[in-house]
Image (cartoon, rainbow, N blue to C red):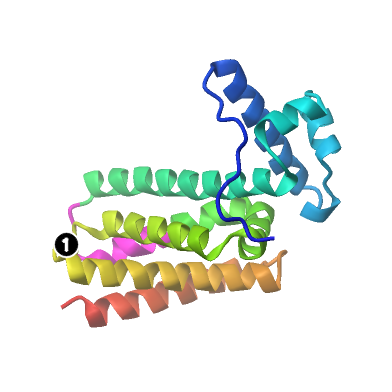
Amino acid sequence: MAQASINVRRKPRQSRAKFTQQALLETTVQLLREKSFDEITIREITEIAGVGLGTFYEYFSQKEDVIALIIHQYIKMNIQQLQQLATAYLSDHHDLNIAPYLRYLIEQQILMIKQEQRIWATIFLLERQLSSVEIYQKHYELMTQHWQTLITFYFPQPVKKQRAAQNLHRILYGFVMQSLLIQPDFRDWENLQQDIITASLAFITTRKD
């Protein structure tokens, strides 16, 4: 079922409402760590979250809407965490060589995904199943803009920066997504990380000038 947008029936404005919606999201994430999406029921989500079925339907029309919002939140959270790490790194290092900086970002990105491997494997799978082309394009644009921000110090020219950001995202997302789609319990992270670093640095060093 393709989602044209995240279909949230009621946007929480008061703190209690936000807490309730977040409880539903966190409960679903908790369940995804234990079982597949198809095995999870709305009743199970509400029982663990401690709310009634009616409350669930105040915020969401179906289970897929919860997943759509989780995907969006995880992408934004990932961006924020990596941006904070990048800012801290650049404040401590003033090396004009992009290679160690890029290696550090990739290592941190892989670490974050590895720590929540089951969730990210589910996200990659359900994003393909549930997201419309428009939503997928928005997530793609969000991530490429994120990489532009991360590498702006090394790529002051907008056109080169945009192309570098697009390809860095393509490399990292493609390598990780395909690995987890094919093998959700993927274990060969060390070699995957090195392959991503090799491919990324090869592109950057040959295309930077």
| Left or right position of 86 against 155 | right
Give the amino acid at mark 1.
Answer: Leu
| Left or right position of 34 against 144 | right
Q: In which quarter of the image is residue 91?
A: top left
Could you tell me which residue is drawn at 74 percent across and 45 percent down? Answer: 63
Could you tell me which residue is drawn at 67 percent across and 64 percent down? Answer: 129
Placement of the N terminus among the 4 image quadrants: bottom right
Percent from the top left, x then y, of residue 93? 22, 51
Could you tell me which residue is drawn at 28 percent across and 54 percent down? Answer: 149
**Above or below, 199 relative to 92:** below
Q: In which quarter of the image is residue 186?
A: bottom right
Percent from the top left, x then y, of residue 145? 33, 57
Q: Is the magenta stretch mostly helix, strand or loop?
A: helix
Q: Is mark 1 on a helix, strand or loop?
A: loop
Placement of the C terminus among the 4 image quadrants: bottom left
Percent from the top left, x then y, of residue 150? 29, 55
Instruction: Specify the segment rendered in magenta.
Output: 94-106
Q: Name the residue under label 1.
A: 96
